[in-house]
Image: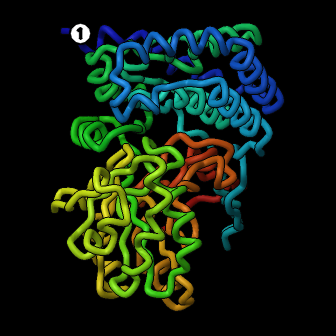
Amino acid sequence: MKTLTDYQQYFENALAASGQISGISSATISIVLNDVAKAAIEQTDHLLAENKKDLDRMDPMDPKFDRLKLTEARIRDIANEMVNVAGLPNPLGHVISEKTMPNGLQISRVSVPLGVVGVIYEARPNVTFDVFALCFKTGNVSVLKGGSDAEYSNKAIISLIHAVLSKHGLNPHITVLLPAEREATEALFNAVGYIDVLIPRGSQQLIDRVRRQSRVPVIETGAGIVHTYFDETGDPEKGAAIVFNAKTRRVSVCNALDCLIVHQNRLSELAQLVEPLAAKNVEIFADEAAFSAIENKYPGSLLHHASPEHFGTEFLSYKMAIKTVGSFTEALDHIALNGSKHSEAIITEDAAHAAEFLNKVDAAAVYVNASTAFTDGAQFGLGAEIGISTQKLHARGPMGLQELTSYKWLVKGNGQIRTP
């Protein structure tokens, strides 16, 4: 059984790199990120070949399969996001506040890196690129623990990044990939003194485990149990487009729609709202009122009676629940009871309901008349994201460059001493 000692060299390498990264200029950081993006495009065939080794070991019906899969288009998107990050302003050294005290002390609060950032994630090779780019841009060293499902993909990506760093004379341990074995996860949980903060990305099971077992401080990125409420005044044309996009754009991501809530007075238009979903073979688990409203109007093989467990479930697949409510308040109550504080939406033409929904719904991202698919760092203008935080301490929602910084107080005096 391996212990922290067996992985100590990885953590020591990361800690040593943390002391060196602060000397890298913003110009060099941008050049390196652009070169990594260029290398990703140039090595697309190699990345896809290594990714195929991982895909061949996974059941295509597994919800993680789509997250694991790389394509030429996805690699281009990854490269473009890296170029976007390279072009964003550097958030380090930003003076958040400053003041001069009555005793003459000049006090300022300035943004600084978090330090060494550990990220544990499952079958998501794009995360390897994203975490490196965001951490490198913000002067943080990244220690990555990917899942065994993506072992070949992650090794290929890290090898690419290390080659670019070395070409520029930089310490390759600016980003460290731990072995895929389970013992490395336990070592990461206990790497106190080496890792400043740990960020999990993946299933609720993974996140719960990290929260329970890690001795390193955790920024929690939560599962996305996502609702869209079609209000009594909702526009059915807008609604159909929003529901279709939120559910089917990419079903394996955390911002995908899980439950459509519909006001009972609009059940006559429910068939119109869900009709486009049939083209994607979306299975619907509907409560009794909703089932009756769309029976014989939605393919019978895709329509099922809902059970209690279908509400509050993150499907990560072509499945969706429907809940009927009698009032706006009942919709809010259902979201509060079953949501995960990730992303929630309302479709309404009632300005008062829109304002109240924005004000009362407790989630990292709250929408009016728009798809929850927009909960994404790039879509929010952050360049990319390291995760979507559903907690309220330090960061909330998509975590980009700013969320990977902390701050320190700088105090300048001229001989002042404190007296009682």
Colour mapping used in the image:
rainbow
> Which residue occupies the foreground of this view, 145 or 38?
38
Residue 162, picture quadrant: top right
Identify the image quadrant of the N terminus: top left
Does the rendering let one see residue 170? no
- Residue placed at 20% from the left, 61% from the top? 305
Q: Tell me the SS state at disc 1.
A: loop
| Residue that protrudes farthest toward the front in the picture | 296
Q: Categorize mark 1 by other alpha carbons within 10 Å: few (<14), some (14-19), many (20+).
A: few
Q: Which residue is mark 1?
A: 2
- Residue placed at 60% from the left, 53% from the top? 409
> Which residue occupies the foreground of this view, 194 or 386?
386
Q: Position of residue 339 (x, y in %)?
A: 32, 63
- Residue placed at 60% from the left, 46% from the top? 400
Q: Is residue 277 above or below residue 117?
A: below
Q: Going by the image, does 299 lie left or right of 135?
A: left
Q: Going by the image, does 237 lie left or right of 334?
A: right
- Residue placed at 69% from the left, 19% from the top? 40
Q: Going by the image, does 48 lie left or right of 182?
A: right
Q: Position of residue 253 (x, y in %)?
A: 45, 44
Residue 10, picture quadrant: top left
Q: Is residue 251 above or below residue 61?
A: below
Q: Position of residue 107 (x, y in %)?
A: 66, 60
Does the rendering let one see residue 307? yes
Looking at the rendered structure, the kind of residue marked 1 is Lys
